[in-house]
């Protein structure tokens, strides 16, 4: 904006002038000591983008590759949701809630629905507690930004509104929704512009930062649907947490929404068999393995171990594909060994098979780097960013050391580099650590499930010493006096809260 300040000006002279420009102001010095400061106006949508979470979008590079349904799986559920979205005549309510326990594939269904809807999709937000995608203050700003890029006149109105009042993006959720979504829709409707029945998808609502925020989001949307202040269709995916169930089953919400359940069921064994067969065929081609590998009995055993949980099946495939192993055949033998343990132990715990697989994965972490690996997991899961490079700096690790500590966990974590061509340890390389599923860290925080691998108090205490040592180092090397107030709380394996600050 500053570079165009004198656009179309003519017939004037500036003597002994000095111009200084920065992202916020444009300063003019007349040479006589008089300064005139002109505020630079930021683009409204740029302000909105900075207040949003781009990584929460269904097509974000930070979620690539996202979980999606394997061809031929979950077809009935996907078809039912698509039918509800597109068929106005038979539609029940303008809100849909699909609930199911951890690991059944809700996010995969949500992703597949989002991709299938294509032009009918207005916006999507995939909450992720572990991957820095759980901030409720960025929820409606993110939806508004996506709608602005989808609907040009909506974006034009929003751009002007935020230019006039940039604080709109900092308001409470109710005020954000009214100013950033309802008001532009109302203005378009007054101009005779039809926004249409676009679908908005919210996945992993239970991973939003607080229960109060989760309830507020549902209530705000329900009020809009009830008052018909927006024309959108809202699809929620979440675990069946008690407070979410209470809101969706209230008398007001029952009349506004359709409820679907995605249960843990052996009815999906055929779909899991299909997925495993296709993925094993890919592995067979990649590694030149015989057509007899794996046997039908092996596939049947894996299906039984999966026990209706797609997350188990997906984790198995990533584990067998391990690049740091002796090969798929050896990895498959390790997984099949879990079947014997399963037969020996009788339990009704719904996640027993998944926990056994996670235990096997943790056992593959070399003992000499186990504590370092645990510290990395804590730092990347409870911090505000899933910045692996930050964790490496705190722990005084090189990039190669970080990768070595991580390499045994590739089936549950993904370490991505933003600039592969830049040299290791270069400032140009941004390393991002993302979790494939929240259930892995839930396993590690619970001593009843993870045993000796629990991120227990001792591990957190050692990490606190590392952090304080790093702060002391920064303080010694700083030429300025500064006061540090730092309070960082993480869940412990004992179910208590433990301060790292």
Image: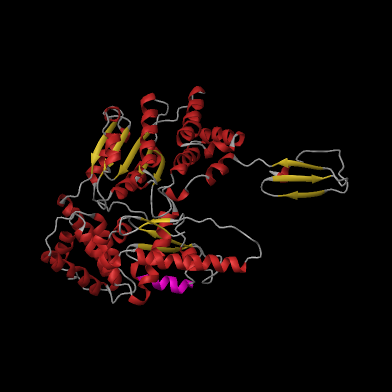
In the image, residue 489 sits, relative to residue 183, either above or below, namely below
Q: Is 179 drawn above or below residue 34 in the view shown?
A: above
Whether residue 420 is visible, yes or no, is: no
Q: Position of residue 222 (x, y in %)?
A: 36, 31
Magenta span includes 398? yes
For the residue pair 216 and 285, the one nearer the viewer reads as 216
Which stretch appears magenta? 397-407
Res 8 visible: yes
Give residue 306's position: percent from left, percent from top. 19, 58
325 is higher (above) or lower (below) than 415 = below
Query: Is 279 situated left or right of 196 in this image?
Result: left
- Indicate the position of residue 109 as horizontal and vertical percent values: 29, 47
- Position of 16 compared to 265: left or right? right
Residue at 57%, 36% in the rendered image? 162
Please check the rendered image and state whether residue 458 is part of the magenta-colored stretch, yes or no.
no
> Residue, x 47% and y 55% (percent of image)?
487
Magenta-colored segment: predominant secondary structure: helix
**Image x and y of residue 402, in percent:** 44, 70
């Amino acid at each position: 904006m500053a570079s165009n300040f004198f656009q179309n000006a003519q017939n004037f002279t500036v003597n002994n002038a000095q111009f200084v420009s920065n992202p916020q102001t444009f300063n003019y010095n007349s040479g006589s000591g008089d300064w005139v400061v002109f505020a630079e106006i930021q683009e409204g949508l740029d302000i909105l983008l900075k207040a949003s979470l781009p990584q929460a979008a269904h097509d974000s590079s930070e979620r690539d590759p996202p979980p999606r349904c394997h061809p031929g799986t979950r077809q009935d559920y996907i078809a039912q949701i698509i039918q509800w979205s597109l068929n106005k005549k038979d539609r029940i309510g303008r809100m849909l809630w699909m609930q199911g326990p951890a690991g059944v594939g809700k996010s995969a269904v949500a992703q597949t629905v989002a991709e299938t809807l294509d032009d009918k999709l207005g916006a999507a937000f995939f909450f992720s507690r572990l991957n820095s995608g759980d901030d409720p203050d960025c929820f409606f700003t993110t939806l508004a930004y996506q709608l602005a890029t989808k609907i040009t006149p909506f974006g034009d109105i929003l751009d002007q509104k935020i230019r006039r009042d940039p604080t709109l993006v900092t308001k409470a959720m109710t005020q954000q929704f009214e100013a950033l979504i309802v008001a532009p829709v109302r203005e378009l409707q007054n101009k005779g512009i039809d926004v249409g029945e676009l679908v908005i998808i919210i996945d992993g609502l239970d991973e939003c930062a607080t229960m109060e925020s989760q309830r507020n989001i549902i209530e705000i949307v329900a009020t809009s649907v009830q008052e018909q202040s927006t024309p959108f269709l809202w699809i929620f995916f979440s675990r069946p947490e008690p407070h979410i169930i209470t809101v969706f089953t209230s008398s007001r919400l029952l009349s506004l929404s359709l409820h679907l359940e995605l249960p843990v069921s052996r009815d999906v064994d055929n779909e899991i068999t299909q997925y495993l067969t296709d993925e094993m065929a890919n592995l067979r081609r990649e590694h030149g393995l015989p057509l007899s590998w794996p046997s039908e009995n092996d596939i049947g055993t894996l299906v039984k171990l999966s026990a209706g949980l797609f997350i188990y099946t997906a984790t198995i495939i990533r584990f067998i594909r391990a690049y740091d192993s002796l090969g798929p055949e050896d990895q498959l033998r390790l997984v099949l060994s879990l079947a014997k343990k399963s037969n020996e132990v009788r339990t009704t715990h719904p996640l027993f098979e998944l926990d056994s697989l996670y235990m096997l994965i943790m056992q593959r972490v070399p003992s000499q780097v186990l504590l370092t690996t645990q510290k990395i997991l804590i730092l990347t899961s409870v911090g505000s960013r899933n910045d692996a490079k930050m964790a490496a700096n705190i722990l005084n690790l090189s990039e190669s050391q970080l990768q070595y500590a991580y390499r045994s966990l590739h089936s549950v974590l993904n370490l991505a580099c933003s600039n592969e061509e830049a040299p290791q340890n270069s400032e140009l390389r941004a390393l991002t650590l993302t979790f494939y599923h929240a259930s892995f860290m839930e396993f590690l925080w619970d001593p009843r499930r993870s045993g000796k691998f629990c991120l227990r108090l001792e591990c957190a205490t050692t990490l606190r010493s590392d952090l304080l040592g790093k702060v002391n180092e920064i303080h010694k090397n700083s030429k300025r006096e500064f006061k540090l107030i730092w309070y960082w709380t993480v869940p412990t394996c004992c179910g208590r809260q433990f301060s790292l600050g």
